Amino acid sequence: MVLLSETITNALVKLPANKTIPAIIVFGDSIVDAGNNDDITTTLARCNYPPYGIDFDGGIPTGRFSNGKVPTDFIAEELGIKPIVPAYRDPTLKPEDLLTGVTFASGGAGYVPFTSQLSGGISLSQQLKLFEEYIEKLNEMVGEERTKFIIQNSLFMVICGSNDIANTYFALASVQRQYNVDSFTTLMADKAQSFAQKLHEYGARRIQVFGVPPLGCVPSQRTVAGGPTRSCVGRFNDATKLYNAKLSANLDSLSRNLRENTLIYIDIYDSLLEIILDPQQYGFQVVDRGCCGTGLIEVAVLCNNYTADICPNRHDYVFWDSFHPTEKTLYNFLSLSWFKANISYIKSCFILRYNKANMKDNTSWSCFCFSLKLCLLSILFLTETLVAIKLPPNLTFPALIAFGDSIVDTGNNNNVKTVVKCDFQPYGINFQGGVPTGRFCDGRVPPDLIAEELGIKSVVPAYLDPNLKTEDLLTGVSFASGGSGYDPLTPKLVAVISLEDQLKYFEEYIEKVKNIVGEERKGFILANSLFLLVAGSDDIANTYYVLRARPHYDVDSYTTLMVNSASDFVNKLYGYGVRRIAVFGAPPLGCVPSQRTVGGGLLRECAEYYNEAAKLFNSKISTKLDLMHKTLPGIKPAYINIYDPLLDIIQSPAKYGFGVSNKGCCGTGVIEVAVLCNKITSSVCPDVSSHVFWDSYHPTEKTYKVLVSLLISKFVNQFV
């Protein structure tokens, strides 16, 4: 990986002409304490003695809980501010150090006040008082105007929370009697939000709040609660993930309320866990013990030159003592965290600087992020372009949630016993890493593209994905199932997830969201998120025409059945508190390659009777949604006319940059779909981007991109 292969460098970042980062200002716990605890005799959370600092300049113990530098030192150096960020309480601190930033962090601190009391360190409220003192000193040195400039343009970092979970909650039975995990992590997340808001009130505008790492895999916690095998402690990690999800949601809510892009949540859980689970990939050998002493329990006062030996090769170890990573881990781990947690920001940076139309679909973003420093610049200076469309100022979408069929299924059918699957190659050939995800496409599908356009996230995961992360629930998932439809018979015919069962999963989802963020925030997410409902194609094409499974219905009565089912589904969503629902009409089914083959005669012309049925359904559902808009208070249903723009692409492909519109790219392109489109029996066309359709039924990612760009501004404005 390019990002991690570059060694620590002294080269400075060339900042844009109109941008500057005058200082880096830090709050938190031992991960970013640079010596504030050194002279506090009431705490054992000190490390101003060997072997701490053995790899620091001159081998000097500075009070940093590491063998060398800590994360904020690396960031300050990469940004060209200075090589290290000193402790504010360092007695040798120079006046000029104040102008470029300091750390107020204290080993043992936590968001919960009791945590800092236990450790005897400097609480976050006390750190804020020291910050007020710092502001006064700046005022005396450079005046109020320059002080205001420094505060507004500096990078503020908050790294805290580990001690709350590990030392306060799980170590003290009295705390567990007063709180359960859910209520305690809510307390933490609320305190963190309050702290970030206070920084904003002081004038800070570039605030980055870090989550908590996988505490259950830290050596000391393995020793304390990991059993005879010292395994990672699941309940510790679960609590950490729950807190991180709540913190992310709180910061998102605060940022939206402030109407400023001033807060960034940094997920460090996944990056450190990745290093722990696959250490060799990052050049490590030992993950379950620290380098100091036995590595099982030694930290702070127990890690000393008198009683604790040092491992012969520190670079092989992920952890320095039993709680804190080594300098090498901190650098790699920090880089991973920045890059992964902020990929959408980095991506926005690229879009700003380069012509998106000239960019290949598989461009590797890491090629443009040669080191941590470029990631930082992308995040700090280009956050104004998170969304590709400009939303009205009073419009926000916290999540995107999809129901329906294969057009919006992002992998749910992978976990269903059905032949309607595509979790195999060549599906996903243009997805990230060329991975088949269960999307019925060569790449991404409409929920992914719409979510990205709205600045939510770049992919919308399947709800049944076994690797689904807690935080994904808060920004949206897909419940859709390929082969499903409005007619209850349609999903039964192919053994997939009916819309009724999708709603049952949605009820389960609502409860999970409530447990993570509480009743009020859950209600906000449901009322303000964008809900997609995409179904009907399989009803018309497969149930009605191909299988003739509804012989007692004519086209008119069958499309009425579909519309009644669709309106009933929308009514149920409304009952759950959903208000913004985009219902897609049926596409020109007669012009889909497989239906041309089945019903288009020898010349494979568009089968017009399919198209007429689609248009009849569309007319009825559009009318029904208009009626619901008038009769259901607060609902904002949007009918999405997908028929006309897709038909125009099919009839005039060259206008949109396509060459082939009557065949799919997979195999012969006339009948292959799902299991028939496979790597063993089906070749792939030389140029996917020249085809409107990927297989004989589903459009290519490029087609979806064209459709989304044509439609999104029109229907999003209907939710104002």
Image: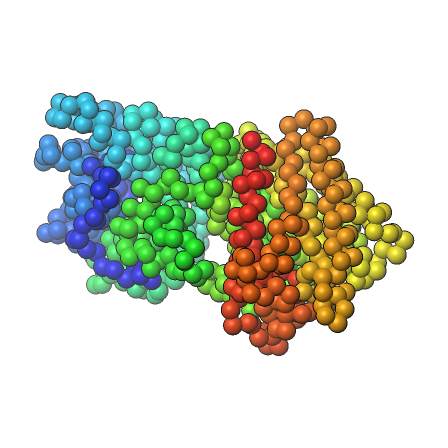
Residue in view at x 39 percent, y 47 percent: 348
Residue in view at x 80 percent, y 59 percent: 545
Q: Position of residue 699 (x, y in %)?
A: 60, 59
In-front residue for pair 225/217: 217
Residue in view at x 88 percent, y 56 percent: 551
In-front residue for pair 676/113: 676
Q: Quadrant of residue 114?
A: top left
Residue in view at x 44 percent, y 39 percent: 248
Q: Position of residue 187 (x, y in %)?
A: 44, 31
**Is 545 situated above or below 677?**
above
Q: Position of residue 70 (x, y in %)?
A: 24, 47
Q: Relative to residue 631, is residue 306 drawn left or right?
A: left
Task: Check the picture and name the quadrant holding the N terminus.
Answer: bottom left
Q: Quadrant of residue 515?
A: top right
Task: Check the picture and name the quadrant holding the C terminus.
Answer: top right
Q: Relative to residue 312, is residue 381 drawn left or right?
A: right
Instruction: Return the residue found at the far right.
Output: 552
Q: Position of residue 643 (x, y in %)?
A: 66, 50
In-front residue for pair 630/315: 630
Is residue 449 visible to the viewer in this orientation of the structure?
Answer: yes
